Every structure is written in C-alpha cells, then in structure tokens.
Image (cartoon, rainbow, N blue to C red):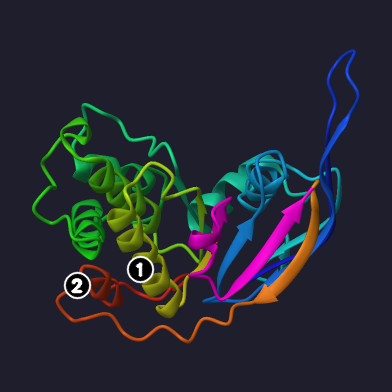
Amino acid sequence: MIEVRELEKTYRRPNLPPVKAIDRVSLRVGRGELVAVLGPSGSGKSTLMNVLGLLDRPDAGEYLLDGRAVHALPEDELARLRNRFLGFVFQAYHLLPRTTALENVQLPLLYSEHADFDERARRALSAVGLEDRVDHYAEELSGGQQQRVAIARAIVNEPAVLLADEPTGNLDSATGAGILALFRQLAQCGTTVLLITHDESVAAVADRVVRIRDGAVESDVASRRPPAGGMPEDSSAARLEKLPAGGAR
C-alpha cells in the first residue's frame, strides 16, 4: 500500500543552518499492516507522517501509494487522493467544539462523492461505540470520547490508510488501550494503520516497529507480539467489522 524510496526533506530558514528532517528513508507497508513509527521529539517522524499523508512534498526520492507515484502530482490531485485514500487522527482531535459529533464526522464527506452523509456518519460513530452521543457537541464530550469522534471522522470515507499522530497522548491508560484496540481491529479489517509515537508501550501493539532517529530509519523490526485475537462481540472495537475493508470502492 505504501512504498517510499530514498525520501529526503530539508527545512531551510533565513540565516539558520538547514535541518534535514528526513534523510534517505526507504519503507514499505502492506495492506492491513499496523506499523508504529517510533522516535523521540525532533526525530523526523511527524515530518514523515506529513509526507506520507500528502500534506508535504519530499525534496527527493519516490513515494508510491497503492502502486501509484504521488510525490510529484499537482495539488488538486493530491487533495483528491487525501480524501479518497487517507484518514488522519491527531493528538489534539481538531474537532469543531460547537458542532455535534455527527456533524464533525460528516465533514470529510463534504468533499467526497458519497451522498449518504447521515448513514455513513452514524455507522462510523457506532463503530467506535458512540451511537448514543451523536447529538452531543464536541465540547460536551470527554477526551476519550472526542478522540473516538476523531477516529470516526477519519474512517467515515473508508480510507485505505489511517495515519495517527500520538493518538493516545492526551488520554488515560484505560481509554488509550481502548483506542489502540480499535486500531488493531481496523488493521484486521484491511486498513493500513501507521501510528506515529514516542511511546514504547503504544508501539508494542504494532505488527512492526520502525525506529526513526535524526531523520533516518534506525531499525525496522517485526513485533514478537502474538497475533491479536478477535474482539468480544459486545465490544465497540468488534463493531468495526461491520465497516467495509479499508480502501474498498
């Protein structure tokens, strides 16, 4: 699903030395893989997420998304691909506070070809266990509930790839564990999931851990974690099985 070859990205500012945020990174991630990109602050992992999410362009190298070279496409085509193929979960949620959970989840659909806004948004909220919060304003929800709304918003277009930047950073341990269980279930349903994190315990849930330091891949190691079993039928994570596999069209 994702293949990058010798990616480079350097930030240049007046009167300051250049900063190489990505240094010849090569990486392949298959459909349905859950991969953690692990590194300390300033390691380049967020820049890598921005490039993989088509929010920023590399200075050099190649990026293939689902077999298609995307690193040199025009901006309007990148915007279309972001909406069709990619979902984003941010640590800060980025919800509209005086807008309901349902309306927040519907936002990506405004730029899609789908017409069934209400049905899709309700199904996504149900998948994350928030069917009883659809009419609540975002500011009325707890941190864990807001993050689940953000996940519902990210999956409402059935993206092939989900990029999650420090998704449990603002959550207590129990809520964070539930969010990570949702990501595992998404991967089991066919969505490629990349977790951007500095937390070893978060990275431990992944199929692979790619360590980034000084903009370069330090190691790429398959997890020794045993394969995840199915979620209990009454869990909110199990409801994700009702959604189509990632990237299905």
Q: Looking at the picture, how far across and down is residue 120, in whole percent?
A: 25, 59
Does residue 209 belong to the magenta stretch?
A: yes
In the rendered structure, find residue 181 and report the number of the disc placed on it: 1
Could you tell whether 64 is left or right of 198 in the image?
right
Q: Looking at the picture, how far across and down is residue 89, in whole percent?
A: 44, 49
Disc 1 + disc 2, Cβ < 8 Å: yes
Q: Which residue is drawn at 79% across and 59% down?
A: 217
- Three-letter amino acid code at disc 1? Ala
Does residue 117 belong to the magenta stretch?
A: no
Q: Check the image and report above or below for 153 versus 95.
A: below
Q: Which of 16 and 96 is in front in this view?
A: 16
Q: Check the image and report above or below for 239 versus 130.
A: below
Q: Nearer the viewer, residue 13 or 160?
A: 13
In the rendered structure, find residue 235 and report the number of the disc placed on it: 2
Write the start and end of the magenta stretch as one range.
Answer: 195-213
Q: Looking at the picture, how far across and down is residue 227, in whole percent?
A: 46, 86
Give the Cα separation between the discs numbered 1 and 2. 10 Å
- Three-letter amino acid code at disc 2? Ser
Q: Residues within 10 Å of mark 1 (few under 14, many from 20)?
A: some
